[in-house]
Image (tube, rainbow, N blue to C red):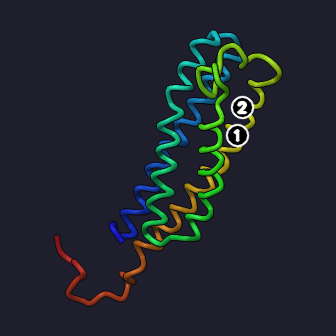
Amino acid sequence: MILAETVLFSLCLIDTGAVLFLLIYYIITLSDLECDYLNAQECCDKLNYWLVPKYIAHTLITFLLVTHGQLVLFFLNLPLFIWLTYEYFTIPQGNLGKYDPAEILNRGQLRKHLRDLMIYIGYYLVSFFIYLYCFILALLKGNPIAGSDDQIVTEM
C-alpha cells in the first residue's frame, strides 16, 4: 500500500466529487445549446476541453484502487473505465472530439449525450456514497470508543 486507507478514500471522494461537478457543468452547457443560448461551436469547444481531465480522473481512481488491493471497488470501476477508453479512442476521423458541432444537433445526438450524462451522474453518485461509506469505515477501523483513559481529553 502506498497510502493509508483514509487518504485513499478521501482522494476518491474528492475525485468523484470533482467529476460530479464537471458532469453537472456538461448538463448545463448542453441545456444551453438545446435552448439556443449557445451556438454549437462554443458548446462543443467547452465540452471537448474537459474530456481528457474526466478520463484522467477516472483512470486515477481505478489505478489507486488496484494498487491498494481494493479489488471489489476496482471491478466496480472497471466497466466505466473500459467504456470511457472506448469512447475516447473511437472518435470518428475528422471530428473535433466526442462532441462535434456539425453533428450534435443531427439525428438526436443531443438527446443521446444528455442520456449518457444522466447515466454517468447516477454512476458517480452511487460511487461517491460507496467511497464515503468506505471512508467512514476506514476512520472507525481502529475502534476509537475502546481507547485508553489517557487518550480522553476532559479539560481545555
In what quadrant of the picture does the N terminus appear? Answer: bottom left
Give the image location of residue 62, x and y in percent.
Answer: 51, 57
In the image, 73 versus 83, the foreground residue is 83
- For label 2, count other residues whose C-alpha is less than 10 Å away and answer few (under 14), some (14-19) or many (20+): some
Give the image location of residue 30, x and y in percent.
Answer: 65, 23
Residue that protrudes farthest toward the right in the picture: 107
Count the labels in the image: 2
Q: Amino acid at mark 2?
A: Leu
Residue that protrudes farthest toward the front in the picture: 93
Occupied quadrant, residue 144: bottom left
Name the residue rendered at 50%, 50% in the picture. Answer: 59
Occupied quadrant, residue 105: top right
- According to the picture, the residue beneath numbered tag 2 turns out to be 114
Name the residue rendered at 55%, 42% in the picture. Answer: 20
In the image, 150 versus 105, the foreground residue is 105
51 left or right, relative to 99 = left
- According to the picture, the residue beneath numbered tag 1 turns out to be 118
In the image, 106 versus 139, the foreground residue is 106
Q: Amino acid at mark 1?
A: Met
In what quadrant of the picture does the C terminus appear? Answer: bottom left
> What is the secondary structure assignment of the residue under circle 2?
helix
> What is the secondary structure assignment of the residue under circle 1?
helix
Gap between marks 2 and 1, in whole Å?
Answer: 6 Å
Up-down: is 12 above or below 40? below
Name the residue rendered at 36%, 63% in the picture. Answer: 7
Marker disc for residue 45: none
Up-down: is 104 above or below 71? above
Name the residue rendered at 46%, 58% in the picture. Answer: 63
Give the image location of residue 73, x and y in percent.
Answer: 56, 65
- For label 1, count other residues whose C-alpha is less than 10 Å away and answer few (under 14), some (14-19) or many (20+): some
51 left or right, relative to 86 = left
Asked if disc 2 and disc 1 are in contact, CB closer than 8 Å, the reply is yes
